[in-house]
């Protein structure tokens, strides 16, 4: 896997960033108003090769790929560069593809920044008058006119009642309404190849603008975060308040997802993936939506100052809407994505060029996944499949032991501990196989976490007595963190561990000890010192659940999942069952939370849910036709699929960054928070879409949607609530001050 830009692309980004920092400073952006065009900036971009990037080498251009162009556009968005840059990039390429020899002199002038060419999005035959980005300053506009692609003289494309092409508009950009049908035209192409090239240009433009909106959104949110660290209210920075920090955490997560979704789309275009056409529409929709939310939240952080023209944030607010709306209502893009996914609509994909990005998990991962798939195919009998459940309730001791024998239980563990030292990419591939076979991983996940902590902090006796049973598959473990009164504030634990001869006595209770009714051990967070800060007086133990004084009582959830409340009265454990030093449980607990918050997602559940909803939409009749043919149904399915694509990319980025040992900017919490929130949102929406059929628990698609709705409720809670993860994202990704109690 490789999510890094190439060395050349990174150098190009740095060069354009330096140039735009100076030539598209906010002073220069303001100075370019009201026309929204900066001739000096335009000339400088041309000299740097911006407008020749996508022109083939044989036509005198640089012949760079679509990803290279998006790298430029992210910087264009970050700096609010003035001028129709995305439109000119695709128009210049079109000019080269359709008339390089006949228009060589013109093409050269465009690449040198001496002549400006934009593009019209609608067929002149249908829409003779159109709004054109850059139309107020363009010399020429490339447009479709029926079966021809034509070059329109923009200077003459004005109405009879005006002498000027430009007019005041929301963001002071060179947007203009042009009378294209009445203007002088020359033909660039009259064949099908020309129509295809024009259609490809429109698709490419969508991705370029999506990239620009991504860069714009990121800068707006970072400006807001910096301000939130400086501005004080009630004696502390406003970024301390979760009402400020949490929306910003949501936005930076959305922005990161949108950036990598654009990159994934370009990768999928290059590899002719079947969903690539839909991904173009969905990536464009998502980044437009995200930009709108980002600039609103960012401006709100500035309060009244954000409304003043003295502060720059309003420039981002207005430009975000301008770029998002040039093509029209962004919701149309979501409808378009729905038609491409579920209505059979096809599209001409642009030429992506070389793409160095790699989302493949590798040969080793594929081989291990195939081995696990074969294991489950052979082992999971119809009787076992009938028992399957996403929670601990789906656990089967026999299958668990067989996995241990095959060294597929904890394959990432060292060989000497019964594993295979499998790398993270292989583990990711294996997790997908567990999901495909619908076999619960809960017991494996918690037991692996406990076993890893025993390996790190346990005594020789603990490793001999407990770890050996874990390795052989004879024992599983549950987690004894939360208590009835403290929830996610695990460091407020009141369960006491007191010295008792050579060992310890444990008294108290734990809540949500899922799996304790079938587990052999529980990892226990206890309080051993009440005279120090609450996080300093904690000690961790491994407690046998068959020890005298342990009581396990069921707690049933409406998710068809059992959890437990467990009571401990005078439970004796030897000192050798202690993990780490006395009163040093924070160190051990932090390691456990790092494992729990390390990432992962509900992507598999999301995809299965959307597929089930699509299946049910094919069965349900609406106004005499299958519901899947209804544009509204397609649109809502497409939105859920967008969330799946984003989840997949955010999780892949988390995995890749961990392998590459990149700085920890809360990529894991982003993956968990985003996927669980979207799982919950889409579960409700798809339940609505397919109602009343989805109310049924009957086997098949309806039952899956029904269960998904109930299952999703808990995903934003266990493994750390979304609020906890938002705080982590705000602090690590945006540098905001800690929002929780010291």
Image (cartoon, rainbow, N blue to C red):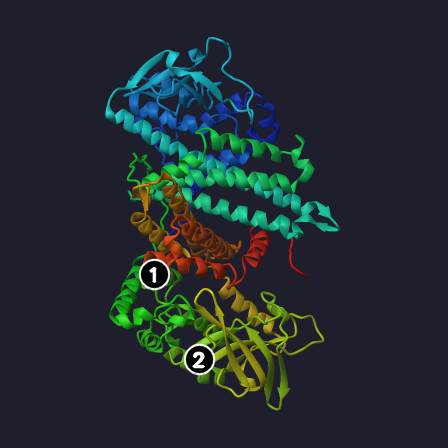
Residue 193 horizontal/vertical position (percent): 25, 26
Crowdedness near tag 1: few (<14), some (14–19) or many (≥20) residues, C-alpha within 10 Å:
few
Q: Secondary structure at mark 1?
A: loop
Residue labelled with disc 1 = 698
349 or 334, nearer to the observer? 334
Is residue 693 shown above or below 196? below
Is residue 236 shown above or below 703? above
Examine the rendering and report whether any part of residue 494 can be seen.
yes
Q: Kindly indicate whether the residue at mark 1 contacts the one at mark 2 (C-beta within 8 angstroms).
A: no
Q: Secondary structure at mark 2?
A: helix
40 or 278, nearer to the observer? 278
* Residue 181 placement, left or right of 220: left
Q: Which numbered disc, 2 or 1, marks the residue that appears first in the sequence?
A: 2
Is residue 183 shown above or below 79? above
What is the spatial separation of the Cα atoms under label 2 and label 1, in whole angstroms? 42 Å
The mark tally for this picture is 2
Residue at the location (75% across, 50% down)? 234
Residue labelled with disc 2 = 467
């Amino acid at each position: 896997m490789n999510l890094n830009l190439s060395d050349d692309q990174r150098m190009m980004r740095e060069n354009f960033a330096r140039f735009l920092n100076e030539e598209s400073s906010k002073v220069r952006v303001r100075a370019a108003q009201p026309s929204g065009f900066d001739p000096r900036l335009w000339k400088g971009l041309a000299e740097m090769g911006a407008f020749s990037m996508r022109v083939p080498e044989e036509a005198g251009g640089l012949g760079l790929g679509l990803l290279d162009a998006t790298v430029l556009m992210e910087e264009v968005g970050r700096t609010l560069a003035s001028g129709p840059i995305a439109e000119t990039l695709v128009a210049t390429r079109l000019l080269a593809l359709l008339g390089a020899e006949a228009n060589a002199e013109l093409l050269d002038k465009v690449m040198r920044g001496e002549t400006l060419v934009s593009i019209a999005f609608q067929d002149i035959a249908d829409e003779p008058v159109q709004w054109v980005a850059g139309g107020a300053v363009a010399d020429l506009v490339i447009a479709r006119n029926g079966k021809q692609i034509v070059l329109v003289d923009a200077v003459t494309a004005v109405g009879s009642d005006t002498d000027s092409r430009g007019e005041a508009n929301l963001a002071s950009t060179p947007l203009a309404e042009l009378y294209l049908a009445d203007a002088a035209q020359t033909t660039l192409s009259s064949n099908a190849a020309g129509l295809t090239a024009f259609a490809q240009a429109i698709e490419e433009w969508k991705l370029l603008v999506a990239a620009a909106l991504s860069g714009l959104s990121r800068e707006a949110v970072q400006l807001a975060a910096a301000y939130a660290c400086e501005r004080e209210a009630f004696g502390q920075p406003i970024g301390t308040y979760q009402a400020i920090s949490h929306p910003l955490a949501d936005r930076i997560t959305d922005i990161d997802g949108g950036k990598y979704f654009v990159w994934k789309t370009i990768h999928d275009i290059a590899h002719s993936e079947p969903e690539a056409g839909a991904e173009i529409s969905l990536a464009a929709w998502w980044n437009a939506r995200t930009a709108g939310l980002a600039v609103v939240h960012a401006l709100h952080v500035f309060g009244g100052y954000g409304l003043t023209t003295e502060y720059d944030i309003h420039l981002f607010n207005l430009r975000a809407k301008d770029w998002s709306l040039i093509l029209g209502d962004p919701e149309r893009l979501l409808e378009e994505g729905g038609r491409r996914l579920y209505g059979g609509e096809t599209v001409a994909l642009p030429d992506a060029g070389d793409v160095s990005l790699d989302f493949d998990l590798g040969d080793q991962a594929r081989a291990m996944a195939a081995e696990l798939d074969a294991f489950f195919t052979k082992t999971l009998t119809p009787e076992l499949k009938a028992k399957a459940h996403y929670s601990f309730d789906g656990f089967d001791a026999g299958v668990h032991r067989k996995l241990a024998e095959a060294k597929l239980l904890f394959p990432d563990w060292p060989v000497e501990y019964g594993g295979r030292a499998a790398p993270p990419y292989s583990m990711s591939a294996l997790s997908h196989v567990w999901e495909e076979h619908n076999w619960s991983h809960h017991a494996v996940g918690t037991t692996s976490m406990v076993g890893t902590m025993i390996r790190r902090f346990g005594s020789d006796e603990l490793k001999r007595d407990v770890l050996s049973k874990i390795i052989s598959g004879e024992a599983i473990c549950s987690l004894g963190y939360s208590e009835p009164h403290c929830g996610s504030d695990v460091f407020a634990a009141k369960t006491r561990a007191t010295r008792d001869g050579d060992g310890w006595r444990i008294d108290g209770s734990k809540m949500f000890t899922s799996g304790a009714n079938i587990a052999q051990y529980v990892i226990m967070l206890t309080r051993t010192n009440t005279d120090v800060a609450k996080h300093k007086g904690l000690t961790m133990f491994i407690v046998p659940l068959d020890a005298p004084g342990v009581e396990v009582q069921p707690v049933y959830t409406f998710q068809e999942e059992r959890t437990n409340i467990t009571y401990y009265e005078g439970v004796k454990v030897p000192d050798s069952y202690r993990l780490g030093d006395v009163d040093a449980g924070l160190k051990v607990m932090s390691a456990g939370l790092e494992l729990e918050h390390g990432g992962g997602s509900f992507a598999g559940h999301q995809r299965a849910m959307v597929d089930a909803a699509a299946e049910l939409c094919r069965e349900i009749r609406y106004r005499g036709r299958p519901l899947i043919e209804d544009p509204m149904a397609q649109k809502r399915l497409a939105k859920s699929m967008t969330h799946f694509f984003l989840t997949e990319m955010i999780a892949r980025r988390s995995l890749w960054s961990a392998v590459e040992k990149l700085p920890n900017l809360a990529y894991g919490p982003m993956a968990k928070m985003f996927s669980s929130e979207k799982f919950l949102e889409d579960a409700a929406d798809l339940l609505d879409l397919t109602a009343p059929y989805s109310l049924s628990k009957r086997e098949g698609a309806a039952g899956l949607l029904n269960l998904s709705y109930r299952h999703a409720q808990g995903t934003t809670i266990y493994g750390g609530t979304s609020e906890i993860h938002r705080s982590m994202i705000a602090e690590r990704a945006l540098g905001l001050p800690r929002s929780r109690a010291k």
